[in-house]
Amino acid sequence: MDITSLAKAIAISVGAIGPAIGIGMIGSKAMEAIGRNPEAANKILVPMLIVSAFAEAVAIYALVIAFSIK
């Protein structure tokens, strides 16, 4: 295993930890809010999906960086 493979592995693993934790927290808090107030499910779902997409974009950026390491 050469150093670039190790650098790529570290870049994607570190870059995926934050979004994974963030998406988990977003989902759990949204389900908690819907459980407390079921009528607000439509108002909670759209912002939850938008924020999840932004968190997922960070992981995609980490993947792009990992692929660009030469």
Image (cartoon, rainbow, N blue to C red):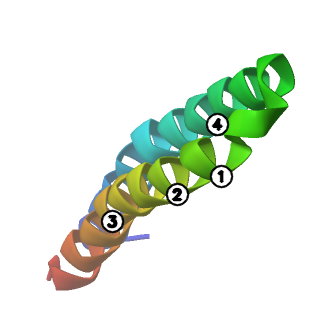
Report the residue marked by disc 3: 57
Report the residue marked by disc 4: 24
Q: Earlier in the sequence, mark 3 or mark 1?
A: 1
Question: Looking at the image, which is closer to me, 35 or 11?
Answer: 35
Q: Quadrant of the C terminus?
A: bottom left
Q: Secondary structure at mark 2?
A: helix
Report the residue marked by disc 1: 42
Residue at the image point whose x is 33% and y is 65% from the top = 57
Q: Secondary structure at mark 1?
A: helix
Q: CA distance from mark 3 to mark 1?
A: 23 Å
Q: Quadrant of the N terminus?
A: bottom left
Report the residue marked by disc 2: 46
Q: Position of residue 39 (x, y in %)?
A: 77, 36
Residue at the image point whose x is 56% and y is 46% from the top = 43
Count residues near mark 4 (Cα–Cα under 10 Å), then give few for <14, some for 14-19, many for 20+: few
> Residues at badges 4 and 3 in contact (C-beta under 8 Å)?
no
Q: Amino acid at mark 2?
A: Val
Q: Amino acid at mark 4?
A: Gly
Count residues near mark 2 (Cα–Cα under 10 Å), then give few for <14, some for 14-19, many for 20+: few
Q: Secondary structure at mark 3?
A: helix
Q: CA distance from mark 2 to mark 3?
A: 17 Å
Q: Secondary structure at mark 4?
A: helix
